[in-house]
Image (tube, helix red, strand yellow):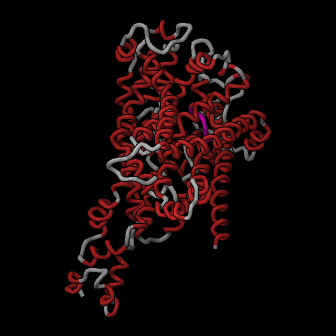
C-alpha cells in the first residue's frame, strides 16, 4: 500500500500478487488470442481435429476474404456514422438537459425530472415492439435516422450530468452573471470546460454502447447495406454457413476500434467513472 | 447597481452585496429562471422515442394490431388475459430470471476480486485494467460467436483444454450455463471498473490509521474496504439485475437465433420479438412488453425504496 512512486520495491507480497495477476490475465485474454490465431488459419485448418492453438501455416486468407466478399467495409462505415452521430447528439443534448435540470428553474421542472427518471427503465429490450411500431409510423425503418435518433434519449446520461452539475459551486456562475454574462455564455465558457472529465466519460460510454448495440439496429434494418458491424457479422456472415476463420477476423475488426480507443483514453474513463459519481457517493 | 456589479467579485465581496443589493439578488435569481430551453432538445427526443412508444404500446396492447399497425380493433384486456394464461410467456420469463440468478452473484464476486487484484498490484496498473476490461469492448455478437465456437463440442477449445466431451450448446442442462460463462467473461469488465474507481476513492488515511492501531490485512478489509464499498455494490447489483433480465444478444447468437435445445434458452425479450416480428401479433407483443415494463419498473422502484429506507434508518 505504501512506498514512493519513483522506486517501488519488489516486496514478497507484490511478487505473489503480480504472479497471480499475470496468470489471471493470461486466462482472461486467451479467448481473444484464440480468435486472433484462428483468423490466421485457413478455413480447413480452423476446423481440424484435434484443435491446436498456433496455425501450422500462417495465412491472411480470412482477412483478405472478409474485405473481398462481404460488405464489411459498408458495415464499418455505417457503424462509424451511427456511433459518431449518436455520441455527438447525446453529449450535447444531455449536457444541456443536465444543466437545465440542475441549475435553472422553470414550471413543472420536478415533474419532468421524475418523468425522465422513469425513462431510465425503458430500452429497446423492454419496449422494442412499440418502439419499432412508432419508428415505423414515422417512416424511419431502414434509414440512418431510424438507427440513430432512438438511441439519443438516454435518461441515464442526463441523470449523471445532472448530478455532476449540481456539484459545481454556484459562486462561479454568480460571479459571471454579475459581470454581465448571459446564461448561455456562462454555460459554454464556464460550466462546460469545468465538466470535461464527465463529458468525456459520458461520450466514451455512449460511443461504446452505440458501437456495440445489436438489438436496435437488428430490429430497424433489413437492408444488409445499412447494417452496422455487430449485426452484419451476426446475421449475414452466419447465414453463409459459418466460416470460422472469417468470422473471427470480422469479429476482431469490429472490436479493434474500441480497444484502441480504450488504450488511449483509459485514464479518462477511470477518472470519469470516479468523477461522475457513478462509483460511491 | 450596474456600475457596482462589475466591481463585485464574490465570494470575498458577497457580504457587502447582500446588505444593500436586493434588486441585484432578484436579478441573479432571474438569471437561473426560464431554463426550459436547455431541456427542450432532450425533451423532444425523449417524447418521441420514450413517451410516445410507451403510450403507443399501451394503446396497442388493448388492440389486435398486426405488423402494419393499422386497422386494429379494440379488444380490451384480452391480450393481457391471454398472455398471463400462456405457458410460453412464463417459461421465457423463467429463463430470464434463471439467467439473472446465475449471473448477478458471480459478476459481483468476480468483479470485486479482479478489482482488488488490479488495485493492489503496483506495477503496470494500466495493463491489468486493459486485460479485464477488454472483453467488454467487443460487440455482444462477437463475444457470443467466439464462445459459441469455444464451446463447440468437436473443434472447440473448452472441451479440448479440459478434456471433456460435453455438447455444451445442444444440451438442455448446459446451454444456459454456457451463455452465463460467456456473459461473465464479456461483461464483468464494466462492474470491475466501477469497483476499481470506488476502491481508489477510499481515503488512504483510513488504512494508515488502522495500520497504526495494529489492524491486519484481513481486519482492514472487513472493517474498512467492505463497508466503504456498500454503495457501489448496491449499484452494481441493481444495474446487473436490470441488464440481466433484459438479456437477448448473447443467447440468440449462441443458439443461431433459435429457442435453444428443447426451447430451454428462449428469454423474455426473445419471446416478445418473436410474437411481434415473426407472428406479426403487435397487439399481443405490446401487452407482453407492458407487462415486462411493469416488472422492470418494480425492480427499479423497489431498489429506490430500499435505499430511502436505509437512509432513514441511518438517521
B55 vs A159, left or right, is: right
Residue B135, image x, y percentages: 48, 34
Quick one: which residue is furthest to the bottom in this view?
B20
Q: Which of B167 and A165 is in front in this view?
A: B167
Residue B225, image x, y percentages: 56, 56
> What residue do we see at 36% from left, 78% from top?
B30
Please tell me whether residue B168 is drawn above or below residue A205 in the rendered image.
above
Q: Nearer the viewer, residue A43 or B128?
A: B128
> What residue do we see at 44% from left, 32% from top?
A142
Please tell me whether residue B271 is drawn above or below residue B254 in the rendered image.
below
Can residue A213 be spotted in the picture? Answer: no
How many badges with numbers are in the image?
0
Q: Which of B188 and A258 is in front in this view?
A: B188
Residue B174, image x, y percentages: 69, 25
Q: Is B115 a magenta residue?
A: no
The magenta region covers: B244-249
Please tell me whether residue A246 is drawn above or below residue B21 in the rendered image.
above
Q: Is B247 a magenta residue?
A: yes
A62 vs B296, left or right, is: left
B18 vs A235, left or right, is: left
Residue B269, image x, y percentages: 63, 37
> What residue do we see at 74% from left, 46% from top?
B77
> What residue do we see at 58% from left, 18% from top?
B161
Can residue B19 be spotted in the picture? Answer: yes
B129 vs B261, left or right, is: left
Amino acid at each position: 500500500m505504501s512506498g514512493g512512486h519513483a522506486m517501488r520495491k519488489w516486496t514478497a507480497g507484490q511478487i505473489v500478487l503480480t504472479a497471480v495477476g499475470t496468470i489471471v490475465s493470461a486466462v482472461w485474454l486467451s479467448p481473444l488470442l484464440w480468435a486472433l490465431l484462428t483468423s490466421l488459419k485457413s478455413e480447413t485448418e480452423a476446423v481440424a481435429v484435434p484443435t491446436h492453438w498456433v496455425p501450422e501455416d500462417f495465412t491472411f486468407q480470412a482477412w483478405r476474404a472478409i474485405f473481398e466478399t462481404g460488405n464489411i467495409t459498408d458495415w464499418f462505415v455505417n457503424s462509424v456514422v451511427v456511433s459518431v452521430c449518436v455520441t455527438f447528439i447525446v453529449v450535447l443534448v444531455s449536457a444541456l438537459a443536465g444543466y437545465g435540470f440542475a441549475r435553472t428553474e422553470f414550471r413543472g421542472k420536478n415533474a419532468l425530472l421524475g418523468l425522465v427518471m422513469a425513462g431510465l427503465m425503458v430500452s429497446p429490450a423492454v419496449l422494442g415492439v412499440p418502439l419499432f411500431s412508432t419508428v415505423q409510423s414515422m417512416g424511419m425503418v431502414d434509414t440512418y435516422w431510424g438507427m440513430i435518433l432512438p438511441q439519443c434519449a438516454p435518461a441515464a446520461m442526463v441523470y449523471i450530468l445532472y448530478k455532476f452539475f449540481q456539484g459545481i459551486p454556484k459562486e462561479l456562475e454568480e460571479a459571471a452573471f454579475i459581470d454581465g454574462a448571459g446564461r448561455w455564455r456562462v454555460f459554454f465558457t464556464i460550466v462546460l470546460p469545468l465538466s470535461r472529465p464527465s463529458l468525456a466519460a459520458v461520450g466514451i460510454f455512449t460511443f461504446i454502447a452505440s458501437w456495440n448495440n445489436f438489438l436496435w439496429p437488428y430490429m430497424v434494418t433489413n437492408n444488409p447495406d445499412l447494417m452496422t458491424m455487430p449485426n452484419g457479422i451476426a446475421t449475414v456472415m452466419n447465414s453463409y454457413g459459418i466460416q470460422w476463420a472469417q468470422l473471427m477476423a470480422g469479429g476482431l475488426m469490429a472490436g479493434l476500434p474500441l480497444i484502441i480507443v480504450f488504450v488511449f483514453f483509459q485514464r479518462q474513463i477511470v477518472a470519469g467513472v470516479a468523477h461522475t459519481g457513478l462509483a460511491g457517493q | 447597481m450596474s456600475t457596482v456589479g462589475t466591481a463585485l467579485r464574490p465570494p470575498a465581496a458577497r457580504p457587502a452585496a447582500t446588505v444593500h443589493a436586493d434588486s441585484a439578488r432578484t436579478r441573479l435569481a432571474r438569471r437561473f429562471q426560464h431554463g426550459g430551453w436547455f431541456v427542450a432538445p432532450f425533451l423532444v427526443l425523449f417524447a418521441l422515442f420514450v413517451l410516445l412508444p410507451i403510450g403507443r404500446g399501451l394503446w396497442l396492447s388493448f388492440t389486435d394490431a398486426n405488423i402494419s399497425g393499422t386497422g386494429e380493433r379494440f379488444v380490451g384486456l384480452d391480450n393481457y388475459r391471454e398472455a398471463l394464461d400462456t405457458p410460453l410467456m412464463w417459461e421465457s420469463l423463467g429463463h430470464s430470471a434463471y439467467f439473472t440468478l446465475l449471473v448477478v452473484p458471480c459478476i459481483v464476486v468476480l468483479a470485486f476480486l479482479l478489482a482488488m487484484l488490479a488495485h493492489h498490484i503496483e506495477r503496470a496498473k494500466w495493463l491489468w485494467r486493459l486485460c479485464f476490461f477488454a472483453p467488454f469492448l467487443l460487440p455482444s455478437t462477437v463475444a457470443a460467436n467466439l464462445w459459441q465456437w469455444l464451446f463447440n463440442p468437436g473443434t472447440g477449445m473448452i472441451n479440448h483444454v479440459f478434456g471433456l466431451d460435453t455438447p455444451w450448446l445442444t444440451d438442455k442442462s448446459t446451454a444456459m450455463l454456457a451463455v452465463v460463462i460467456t456473459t461473465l467473461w464479456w461483461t464483468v469488465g464494466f462492474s470491475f471498473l466501477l469497483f476499481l474507481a470506488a476502491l481508489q476513492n477510499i481515503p488512504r488515511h483510513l488504512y494508515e490509521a488502522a495500520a497504526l492501531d495494529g489492524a491486519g490485512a484481513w481486519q482492514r478489509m472487513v472493517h474498512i474496504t467492505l463497508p466503504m464499498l456498500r454503495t457501489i455494490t448496491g449499484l452494481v447489483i441493481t444495474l446487473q439485475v436490470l441488464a440481466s433480465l433484459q438479456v437477448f444478444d448473447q443467447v440468440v447468437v449462441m443458439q443461431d437465433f433459435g429457442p435453444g435445445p428443447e426451447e430451454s434458452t428462449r428469454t423474455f425479450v426473445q419471446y416478445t420479438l418473436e410474437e411481434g416480428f415473426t407472428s406479426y401479433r403487435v397487439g399481443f407483443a405490446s401487452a407482453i412488453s407492458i407487462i415486462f415494463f411493469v416488472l422492470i419498473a418494480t425492480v427499479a422502484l423497489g431498489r429506490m425504496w430500499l435505499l430511502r429506507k436505509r437512509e432513514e434508518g441511518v438517521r
